[in-house]
Image (cartoon, helix red, strand yellow):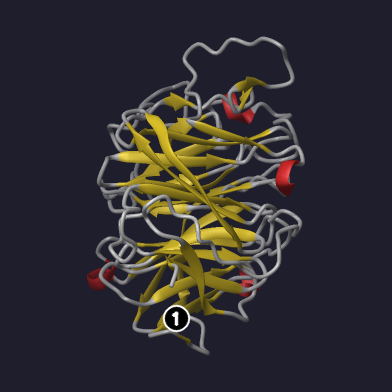
């Protein structure tokens, strides 16, 4: 993760424009660098990923003492590397499979499958699904999520350093700088995953068939909104802009522009060829304004506890620590809100089984986003 520069404890907001204000309600503290939160299908428990290599469970508001999974012995936790996310198989209740994305001891990124039940997982059940060599220590991407289509989506950064020196963002012969789409239920011969036949580059001799979208710098959290059928991707900028791009979830083969573009501007150039590139719908300055440095993408709110905010996409910044949201309406950003909240060094958002949202901070705390009292 980026160097800590967020604010202190959370503050409350009275702002709301008809939906009322929001506040952050602490759920748990004392965690070790929490970076992801999710739930199993139909499960009320919260599963929290610690970057050091553990997955913790919160059950009925209580943090369980024994981790669900502890693989610290095989995880390289350093800077932006570590155990970065997890995803439960849609049929977890029957097959017990869940997947993790972590950095191995050699510095490479690895997607692995484990088996779990109840409050524990089998640490010896790990099966490597795919391993991706990393040329530098940063820009690991790191989120994995199952789409409504049952495919596993894997977000990868451009491989690191600065400015994409290896040109991975625009190189479809590498997996780096891309959002991948793979089939973990129907592996191809000699592999532990399959390449879906309807992937945009499936069967291509000049591009990796796993690629769904490319031209990414370091996607730090993406989210599907199944209600509207959209994919939201928050991509961390270089030295000027943080960006959010929204596309149809079923539209693959798109080029998000890095490193031709940073946000809506040509990267390190007055002019560039923007033909065929997908532009972000929103960007903000990271050059020092309000202390922002690295976007943290969130989720579209589809819960029921906060009246009037259904359809709002929430996001933050690791250094700015703010809570902002907007609706995407008829192809444009609408109803933008800054909720006047500062949570800390925001590493991720999470969603529970009811669609309610959470914010995680590097300082070891998890907050639930709730209506102000």
Q: Is residue 271 left or right of residue 84?
A: right
Q: Quadrant of residue 257?
A: top right
> Quick one: 310 or 82, which is closer to the camera?
310
Q: Tell me where residue 249 sits by quadrant.
A: top left
Residue 35, visible in the rendered structure: no
Q: Element at badge 1? A: strand
Vertical placement of residue 146 versus 239, above or below:
below
Residue shown at 60%/27% (left/top)? 258
Residue corresponding to mark 1: 58
| Quarter containing the C terminus | bottom left
> What is the crowding at mark 1: few (fewer than 14 residues within 10 Å), some, or many (at least 20)?
some
Count of numbered tags: 1
> Could you say where residue 140 lies in the image, as x and y percent from the top left?
62, 48
Can residue 368 be seen here? The reply is yes
Question: Percent from the top left, x then y, of residue 285?
Answer: 67, 36
Q: What residue do we see at 68% from left, 63% from top?
A: 76
Identity of the residue drawn at 28% across and 33% down: 197
* Horizontal and vertical percent position of residue 95: 26, 69
Q: Residue at x 53, y 80 (%)?
A: 28
- Above or below 58: residue 220: above
Point out residue 141 in the picture as x, y percentages from the top left corner: 57, 47
Q: Quadrant of the N terminus?
A: bottom right
């Amino acid at each position: 993760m980026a160097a800590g520069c967020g604010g202190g404890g959370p503050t409350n907001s009275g702002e709301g424009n008809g939906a009322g204000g929001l506040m952050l309600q602490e759920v748990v503290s004392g965690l070790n660098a929490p970076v992801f939160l999710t739930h199993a299908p139909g499960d009320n428990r919260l599963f929290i990923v610690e970057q050091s290599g553990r997955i913790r469970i919160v059950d009925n508001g209580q943090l369980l003492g024994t981790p669900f999974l502890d693989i610290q012995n095989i995880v390289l936790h350093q800077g932006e590397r570590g155990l970065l996310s997890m995803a439960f198989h849609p049929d977890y209740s029957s097959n017990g499979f869940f997947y993790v994305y972590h950095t191995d001891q050699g510095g490479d990124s690895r997607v692995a499958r484990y088996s779990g039940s109840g409050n524990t997982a089998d640490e010896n059940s790990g099966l490597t699904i795919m391993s991706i060599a990393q040329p530098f220590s940063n820009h690991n991407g790191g989120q994995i999520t199952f789409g409504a289509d049952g495919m596993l989506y894997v977000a990868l950064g451009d491989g690191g350093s600065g400015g994409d020196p290896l040109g991975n963002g625009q190189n479809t012969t590498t997996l780096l700088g891309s959002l991948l789409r793979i089939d973990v239920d129907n592996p191809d011969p000699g592999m532990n995953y399959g390449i879906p036949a309807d992937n945009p580059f499936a069967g291509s001799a000049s591009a990796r068939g796993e690629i769904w979208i490319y031209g990414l710098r370091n996607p730090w959290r993406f989210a599907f909104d199944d209600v509207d059928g959209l994919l939201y991707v928050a991509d961390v900028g270089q030295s000027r802009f943080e960006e959010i791009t929204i596309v149809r979830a079923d539209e693959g083969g798109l080029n998000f522009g890095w490193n031709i573009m940073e946000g809506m501007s040509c990267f390190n150039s007055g002019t560039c060829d923007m033909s065929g590139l997908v532009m972000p719908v929103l960007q903000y300055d990271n050059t020092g304004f309000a202390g922002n440095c690295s976007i943290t993408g969130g989720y579209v709110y589809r819960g029921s506890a906060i009246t009037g905010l259904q359809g709002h996409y929430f996001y933050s910044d690791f250094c700015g620590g703010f809570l902002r949201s907007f609706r995407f309406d008829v192809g444009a950003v609408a109803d933008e809100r800054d909720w006047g909240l500062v949570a800390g060094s925001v590493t991720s958002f999470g969603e529970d089984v009811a669609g309610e949202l959470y914010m995680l901070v590097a300082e070891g705390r998890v907050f639930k986003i709730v209506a102000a009292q």
